[in-house]
Image (cartoon, rainbow, N blue to C red):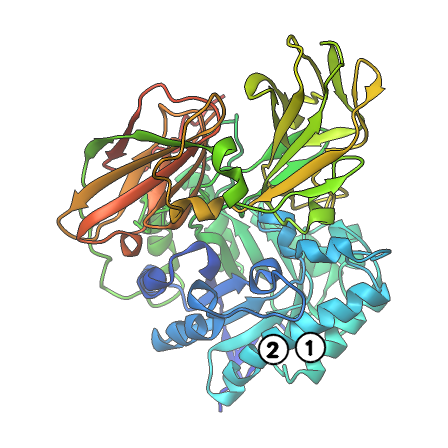
Amino acid sequence: MPELSIGEKDFLLDGEPYQIISGALHYFRVHPDQWADRIRKARLMGLNTIETYVPWNLHSPTRGEFDTSSGLDLERFLKLVADEGMHAIVRPGPYICAEWSNGGLPPWLLRIEGIGLRRSEPQYVAAVSEYLKSVYEIVAPLQIDRGGPVFLVQIENEYGAYGSDKEYLAELVRVTREAGITVPLTTIDQPTPQMLADGSLPGLHLTASFGSRSTERFKTLREFQPTGPLMCMEFWNGWFDSWGFHHHTTTVEDSDQALDEILAAGGSVNFYMFHGGTNFGMTNGANDKGAYVPLVTSYDYDAPLDEAGNPTAKYHAFRKTIAKYASVPDELPAEAAAAPEFSVGLTATAGLLEVAGSLGTAVTGETPLTYEELSQDTGFVLYEASVEGLAPGVLKIGEEVRDRAYVYVDGVPVGILSRDSHERTLRLPLAGSTLTILVEDQGRVNYGERLGEAKGLIGAVTLNGTPVLNWTARPLDVDRLASLDLSGAATDLGPTVFTAEFELAEASDLFLDAGDWGKGLAWLNGFNLGRYWRRGPTRTLYVPAPVTRAGSNRLVVLELESVAEESAAFVGGLSLGQTEF
């Protein structure tokens, strides 16, 4: 059987020098019926390897479960890589960052009292061990020395930027080896001496992450690790986008030059990303370095293959550069077919507050319960309390709103409290009997010290200094809206559920333009396309062709604020926003 090993200066495949030219492709950000297409396009660009993270929180929404159904079928994904004659790199974390909610850590971890994330705390290590064993049951039989595609596995992820617990890293290695992983193990860190030192262990091969100044970064890595192959495990050929900012791009020329430097030095590379895909549903992460900044639904990443899987100028430039150092197929991907363009009217079908009772069960508490106390991993919680007899005045959330709160008095909207604006007070202009607060988790922080924080209304709630007590908190499963019978439901002044029906001649990629809407979520044929927000930069929601069907299709929209036009416009392609701010 073939074998990959670490040589004096190169990766060795069956004893011969081998330059890894890889691309990141996250199976969980791509519809499973499109995996084969994206993998094939990677090979046609000249790649010989596909790399993927594994998202613990998606596979294990509850402890003891490891879901591999449909879009989580890691085994099928890796076999498709093998079918294309390519190798695979698996990076199971357990922390993956990836601009993914909570960096991939499942929220149920946060409900374990006294747990210590990403360190050798016994409760955390026990949970991680269970998870990794489940991953490796799939990966181990698919290693290269057993006839499969997997020839590298990564331990943790950019750990030197977070901690330096060597006992923790050693335990991950032990679990990995005992689970039957025999291929070389790697780590990744930004190439600074401190991060490389903190994030590594003897016996693990160090790789780096960077997007420019390749020669300089490799020099630092070589000084720290005198032997073995040089590899940029994350070549940042693009960047991610956040709500309220511009669409990030890197120039083709700059990225191509950095790539050429890597390959000319004999280095191996993994494009991050080759194809970014989409943060479908409510899976996006967020950053908070003093200001909370949630990420958009598109994970286009200005990558060689765009969000819809179509080659970009970078694809063709990188392909040409790769051809200087490796064999590249003559074949090119086919041009994308034009997407149907049309509009369809929206019908206001129900008010969210009116149908909330069908979306979850209310729980009582003296103070507002957090998402963690409610076992609500993401999405929305509806809080209510009596304010009978209290005068209008200043409503105050004691510590913080996480992340966006829509406030109503007797069903009348009176304002919004937004975490990204550091808002936690609001003057209530109305006297009333019932205070209702709809809270949206806009994405769990995926990097840094605020990883693993609680969500909801954090701290005591007061009105004019008087504590507001005896709350109900109702976790809302808004995905039920896509299949709920809304006939006869009334609309109100709060968030509105719109529906639309339209016909297609055949299944097709679509691009739903949400630019005339406010803020919310959309589903097509029950599939959660993700969040939209007039704040931008992204205007379109990508609709994968396998989600659509010939004949009748049903669109459901949850609008939290207001729409300028009660219609749904499907446009010809992606609209990711302005590139300057």
Q: In this view, does 338 lie above or below 139?
A: above
Report helix, strand or loop for mark 1.
helix
The alpha-carbon separation of the residues under discs 2 and 1 comes to 7 Å
The residue pinned by badge 2 equals: 136
Q: Which of 289 and 71 is in front in this view?
A: 71
Residue that appears at 22% across and 63% down: 331
Q: Position of residue 136 (x, y in %)?
A: 60, 77
Q: What residue type is labelled 2?
A: Tyr
Report helix, strand or loop for mark 2.
helix
Mark earlier in primary sequence (2, 1): 2
In the picture provided, is 59 more to the left or to the right than 567?
Answer: right
Q: Residue placed farthest to the bottom in the image? A: 1
| Mark number, residue 402 | none
Quarter holding residue 384: top right
Residue that appears at 34% across and 55% down: 319
Residue 6 visible in image: no
The residue pinned by badge 1 equals: 176
Q: Is residue 40 above or below residue 12?
A: above
In the picture provided, is 12 more to the left or to the right than 331?
Answer: right
